[in-house]
Image (spheres, rainbow, N blue to C red):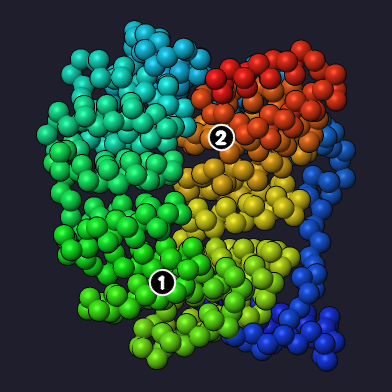
Amino acid sequence: MQAKHLIHELLRRSMRHRAHHTNPYLHFACNALCTVTELPKSDFPESPDLPSWLKSPEPPVTDSSCDDFVIPSLASWVESHNLQDRSKFVRPSPVEQPIKSDADKISGILKNRYPSPESFVEALDGCGVDVSDSLVAQILKRFSNDWAPAFGVFTWAKTQTGYVHSSELYNAMVDILGKCKKFNLMWELVKEMDGFKGYVTLVTMTQVMRRLARAGRYEEAIEAFKGLEQFGVEKDINALNVLLDALVKENSVEHAYEVFLEFKDLTPLNLRTFNILIHGWCKARKFDDAQKMMNEMERHGFRPNAVTYTSFVESYSREKDFRKVDAIMDEMGEKGCKPSVVTYTIVMHALGKAGQINEALNVYEQMKKDCVPDAPFYSSLIFILNKAGRLKDANEVFEDMEKQGVSRDLLTYNSMISSACAHSQEENALKLLRKMEKDSCKPDHKTYAPLLKMCCRKKWMKVLDFLLSHMFKNDVSIDLGTFTLLIHELCKSGKLDRACLFFEEAILKGMIPMDSTCRMLVEKLEHKNMTVDKERIELSMLRAVE
């Protein structure tokens, strides 16, 4: 089915449902993009089909509330990961597996906790592994949220005869140290890089500035920009734009504007410079300042483009002010500036989130005059259909993508998996993860989050262990957000032993859970009279914040 025919069919279905469920004299809601009657969110219920393992006339292999339960149709896939008996679960690190590669061998050593990076280096000595850039890159990715073993293997590799890290690996290590807020070590590594000709580039300093800004160290990020030339990096418009973008993305457009005022006469500006600041002011909902920046852009001889206007569209869409969105789109038309597929996707997504499903689908009718759908557009369409409860329609769009020559990307799969979990389609959610594997689409944290939450709520501990193993094998390093999710959901499910283990593992990796997380766990332990565990958690937290 052609894309336009598919959208037409979705609209037709919407109108059919509307005719059945809506009083024609009620629910009229005028909207900037469309005047079609609005439907209540409950007008598109689709009760999920019973899972196949419940439909089977044969009795289930095991109780679905049992820790070791695995959906029968997925059992062979889960078992293929060689899960060991986890009844004596020691800590939530990924499951030990038969050594199949040098990466697994090194990972097995690094999973043991050592007091310092130097201890990791000692543990790795004599492991009999030949070092290569690809091997170190994989290990750094696996431990990207755990700086000590990452820095340990990075340091160990430097001691191996005949091996020298590439600049890309130095950049990866700089980023890990910055992410984990080990800024002194980060700067030491940058200075070490400076000893290799051409190693420190704008890529390196981009990571430095972004990590400093992410940590709220705005002044230090600005100082890093001012000191670029001492590392042989030119302080040009590209570098300035990197700094401005880093500050804006971390909600400090005011700092970005001060930098702009200081340097605007020292380097030639470009269109991107102004678009970054306009985006920042719009993001902060300071539309008058955004308009002033647009006026200054024009005084410098730059015409606003689709990116410029999309910043306004995005902010008004977030506020659900679709009349102003319509006004911006009209202005674009008057000035001969065609909206991009990004612009249309933002509007469609916002309408869908606001429950205006028909208006969202009608955006496609406008879009096809200017551009063709891409993967993010389809992903957004899938999201809003799922949100409206139209799961079959969403699945049809998902299946139709490849027929339209549009490859499903990470966002597409994440939307489908999240929806399947939200609608209690556990089997489908896990099958989508398996399909990602077959399609060589690498998952990320957002892929696993709803699946982990689902397993905790269902008390499927064997599948939870499988997912942790799957994450590790796909080089997705567990971050604090994932630990927090696991601790909270396991507490809700009464799996306090496991919640404690995840809490302690987070602290061992240098990630300090929020006070609210600690308080929740302690209260649950106290309620269950688990005094020894309660005192251990309190002591762990006390030591972590010292």
Q: Residue, x 57% and y 46% (percent of image)?
A: 447
Front residue (pair 466, 77): 466
Q: Quadrant of the C terminus?
A: top right
Which is nearer the N-term, disc 1 or disc 2? 1
Q: Residue, x 36% and y 31% (percent of image)?
A: 183
Give me the disc on residue 151.
Answer: none
Q: Three-letter amino acid code at disc 2?
A: Leu
Apparent side of residue 485 relative to residue 138 in the rendered image (left or right):
right
Q: Can the viewer see residue 121? A: yes
Q: Can the viewer see residue 84? A: no
Quarter where residue 81 is shown: top right
Residue 255 % position (x, y): 37, 54
| Number of marks in the rendered image | 2
Q: Residue, x 79% and y 34% (percent of image)?
A: 493
For disc 1, the marked residue is: 290
Disc 1, SS? helix
Q: Residue, x 64% and y 85% (percent of image)?
A: 31
Residue 540 % position (x, y): 63, 18
Residue 376 % position (x, y): 49, 64
Label 1, label 2: how far apart the Cα atoms are: 35 Å
Quarter where residue 481 is shown: top right
Query: Which-is-in-front pick, marks 1 and 2?
Result: 1
For disc 2, the marked residue is: 480
Residue 346 % position (x, y): 52, 70
Q: Quadrant of the N terminus?
A: bottom right
